[in-house]
Image (cartoon, helix red, strand yellow):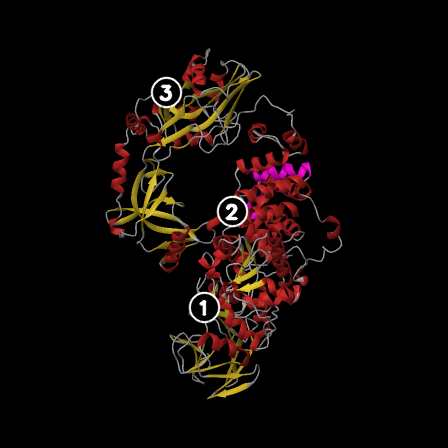
Amino acid sequence: MREFAQLYQRLDETTKTNDKVLAMRDYFSQASGSDAAYALYFLLGNKLKPSLPTRIIRRAARLGAEVPEWLFEETYQWVGDLAETAAAMVKGRSHGGQESLPDTLPDTLPDTLPDTLPETLSETIAERLLPLLRSASGTQRSTRKSSLSSDRRLEIDEALASTLVELWSRYDLLERFVFNKLLTGNLRVGVSAKLVTKALSQWCGVPSEELSHRMMGEWEPSETFFKQLVAPEYSGSSPAKPYPFCLAHPLPQGYSEENSVVDFLAEWKWDGIRAQLVRRAGRTYLWSRGEELLEGRFPEIELAAEGLPDGLVLDGEVLGYRDGVPLAFTLLQRRIQRRKPGVKLLGEVPVVFIAFDVLEHEGKDLRQEAYEQRRRLLESLDWGVACVGQALRISEVFSFSDWGSLFQKRDTAREHGSEGLMLKHRQGRYDVGRVTGTWWKSKVTPYTVDAVLVYAQRGHGRRAGMFSDYTFALWEEDRLVPFAKAYSGLSDQEIVRVDRWIKENTQKKFGPVHEVLAHLVMELAFENLQESSRHKSGIAVRFPRIVRWREDKQARDADRLEDIRRMLKGKGESG
Amino acid sequence: MFRDLLECTPRGLYCPAGDFYVDPWAHVDHAILTHAHADHARSGSKRYLSAKSSESLLRVRLGQSIDLQTVAYGESLRIKDARVSLHPAGHILGSSQVRIEVAGRVALITGDYKLQSDLTCDAWEPVRCDLMVSESTFGLPVFRWPETRLVVQEMIGWWEENQRQGRTSLLLAYSVGKAQRVLAEIFRVCGVEVASKVAVHGAMLGPNRAYVSAGVALPELPSAASLGGQHDWSQSLVIGPPSSQSTPWMDRFSDPSIAMASGWMAIRGTRRRRNVERGFVLSDHVDWPDLLTAIGQCRPERVWVTHGFSEVVSRYLTESGIAAEVLQTRFAGEESEPTVVEKSEEAS
C-alpha cells in the first residue's frame, strides 16, 4: 500500500510525461504480480465494485474527526475532494513517521499494528477494502429486501463507519488518501491509458499496441492475468475480445491547404455510441468504446447480427433511428441506461448499428490493410438475413474533388442529424495510439450565445475549492432564465479572477450554490439543442462550454431566449 | 460589554481606555504592533510599541527612523487607563500577543500565532483572558500540521535527491519568518557546513541580518544574484519568496525542482494551483487542533474571530459553548495566502 501511495504521489507531483512513465515503470519493476495487476487496474481508471456509498465515508470522517455534519460539509465544499477531506480530517498519523498527537490514537492499536504493517496493495484490497465493500453492499441488499427500520439502517451505517475509522488509523495521511480514492472508485491521477500502457511496455518489452489489445474487454486484476499480459507470447484469449479503437482527431487548421482531398473518403459523423460488433464462436458481442460489453441493451442489433458469418468484427456506431432519421443523443441515452429495455421503449427509440469498417473477416485480422480495401470488403459482405428489420446498416461514403465542396457538405450535417464529417485516408491502416491518425473529424461550427452568469458553485479536482462551476441565463422579457451549466473553457488565471469576483458579488447562498449579481457575460458554445420539458428554459443544450469571457459586454447585451429558440427552429427535422 | 477595553474601528482594533491601536491599517498616533508582517505592521503612524525582539525586523520593514519603543515579554506598562503587556505568539521573531487590562477585564489580541516549536522565536504562551481576538487562517479541521521534524526530514530528502540528479532545489518560503525558520531547521540537522551550498533571494538578506542581530544563530548566506554567471547550481538549495516563481530571477538555476513551504500545501488543490513539484506542510499559524487548544488554555468568555475561516470557527465555538463572533479586519483575507509584500532588493 505504501509503494502504491508513493506512486500516486509521484504521478501527482509532476506534469512531465516522462517522469510519469518512469514512476510507473519503477513501480511495475518492483511490484509483485498481484500488486501490479491491481495497480494497473486502478491506473486505467477501473473501480472496485461495488463502491462504498459516500454517506458512509462522510459519517466515518465526522466520527473520526469529531466534527458536526455542517462543519464536515463546509470543509468538504472548500477542499472539493471527498477522499482528501476525510483523510486529512481524521485524527491519525500525518506522515510516514510517528503519530504527532499520541493521546488521540485509539487504545486498540499498539500491539497489533507492527505485525500487520507494512501490507502490500493486494493485501490491503483483499483484507481491508473488499470485506468492507462486501459488507456494505450486503446490507444495501438486505435493506432493500426486508425494508429495515431507519434506526436499524442507521445502526448499520454507524458500524460500517467505525470499521472505516479503524482502518484509517492503520495508515498515514497519504495512504489514507489513496485508500479513500480506491474506496470511492475515483483515482484520477492524470495518466491516460496510453501512458500506462507505454510504461508497462517499457518494463516488460511487449509492444504497446499488443498490450492494449491484450487488455481489451473485461479482466480480473489477478496475478495470473498480469503474468499472461506481460509474457512475450500471449497464451490467454477470449472469443469476445474486441480490437483497440482507432480514434479520429480534429482536422487541423490549414490541413486542407497542404493535403489533397481526393486521398480521403468522407462520411457523416454520428452522435451515437461508438461500438465494435464481434461475431465469434457463434456468438455476438457488442462493445462500447469504453470497453464495456453492451450485452442485452440493444437486442434488435444482436438479433440482426445472428445472420452474420463467424469470425467477423465490425466497427461502427449505435444510433437511435426511426423512420429513416437519426434520433437525438438524449433519446438514445434512455436506451443506454436500460439494461433490459421494455417493448414500449424499444418502440419509441429503435436503434441501428451503422457499420463503417471491418476489422476481421473469416477470422483474419485486417487492420494492416488499406482502408479502401476494408471498405470494399465491407460493402461486398454477405449480410445473410441480417438486413431484416434494418438494425444493421452500412454507412454511406462520399468522395470529393475539392475541399470547398467537402466543407459545403459538412455544413449541411445538421439537416441529416449529424455533427459533421469524418475523413478517412484511403490508404490508412486501422491505427491505435497515434496522435495524428489517419482519421480526422470536422465538425460543423457550434452554436454560440452570449449568456449571463447567475449561479456559481465550487469545483472539484484541479479546481477544487474555486468557484468554477457556473450556471448561465438568457433574457426573457426582463427576466433572466437559467438555461445551461458550463465548467470548462476559461483559463486558470480567468478562473482565479472570476472566483474572486464571485466571492465579492454573492447575493444569496442556497447551500453550496451562490447566486451572484447579474453582471458577467460569457460566450457559450454548444453542440446541439432540443426542446425539453425538464428545463425551465424549455431547451436542453448539449456539451455547453465557455468560449470566452465577454468583458466588453454588459449583462443587458446578452442574448435572449428567443434567439436560441430560433436556432432550434432553423436546424431542421433531426432534433 | 468590552467597550472600554477594545473596539473595532475603521482604522483598526482600538483600546479607548489607553487610546492606542493594535496593528492599525490607517495612520494613527499610537500603534502597538504584534509582528513585522506587512498586513500587521504598516508605516505612517507616529509612535510604535513592540516586543524588544521585534525591533530589528520592524526597522528593516518600516525604516530605521520610526519612533519605536520596545518592551520585554511579560513586562507590564501603564498606558493611560490600560495596563498593557506583550507575550510571545510563536509566529515569527518578535511576534507578540497583546494583553490589555482595563478595570480587571482582560483582552488578548493574538495577532498571528502558532503552538508548534520554532527555533527562531520564543514559544507561544497561554494568557488567561476574558476577550480573545484570534486569527483563523487555517480554521478548518483538515488542517492538522505534521511534526516539524518530519517535514524537515522530507525537505532534506528532497534536496539530497535533487543533488543526485544535478538539479537546483528551489524552495519558496516567505522572506520574513518562514525562510529563517526553514534555514535554522536545516542547519540544525545538516550542520552549518552545508551553508556553502545554500543561497537566498536578495529580499531575504535584510530579514536574515535582522534575525542574526536579534540573536538567532544563522550563518551568513549569499544572495543568488551575487554568485555570478559561472556558479554551479547543481547542488544548491536556494530559498526564494513565493513571488519569485516564474520570474527571470529563476533562469540562472539548473533545471530547478520547485517546492514550497506553507500550510496551504496540506491541500492538493491549493498545492496544484501553486504549480510546484513538492509541497511541504510547514506553517507559522495555528492548525485546527492547536486553535482549539489555545482557546481552551486562554479560557476567554468571548472570542472575536478574524482573518481566515472566521465564520466557520465562530460557529463551531458558539456551538461548543464559547461565545464567538466574526470580526471584519483588514488582515490577510479569507481563503488567500497571507500577502507579504516582497521588497525586491535584487534586480533579475
Residue A476 visible to an observer of this rendering:
yes
The amino acid pointed to by label 2 is Thr
The amino acid pointed to by label 1 is Glu
Query: Label 2 lies in what chain?
Result: A
Question: In front here: B220 or A54?
Answer: B220
| Residue A397 image label | 3
- Name the secondary structure under disc 2: loop
- Where residue A533 appears, as percent x and y from the top left, is 34, 37
* The C terminus of chain A sits in image quarter: top left
Q: Is residue A249 above or below residue B210?
A: above
Q: Is residue A316 above or below residue B287?
A: above
Q: Nearer the viewer, mark 3 or mark 1?
A: 1
Residue found 66% across the figure and 39% down from its top: A29
* Horizontal side, residue A467 vs residue A163: left or right: left
**How far apart are the alpha carbons under marks 2 and 3?**
41 Å
Residue span colored magenta: A32-55
Residue A148 visible to an observer of this rendering:
no
Query: Label 3 lies in what chain?
Result: A
* Residue where numbered disc 2 is placed: A15
- Where residue A227 appears, as percent x and y from the top left, is 67, 31
* Horizontal side, residue B4 vs residue B91: left or right: left
- Where residue A202 appears, as percent x and y from the top left, is 60, 36
Circle 2 Cα neighbour tier, 10 Å, few/some/many (<14 / 14–19 / ≥20): some
| Residue B345 image label | 1
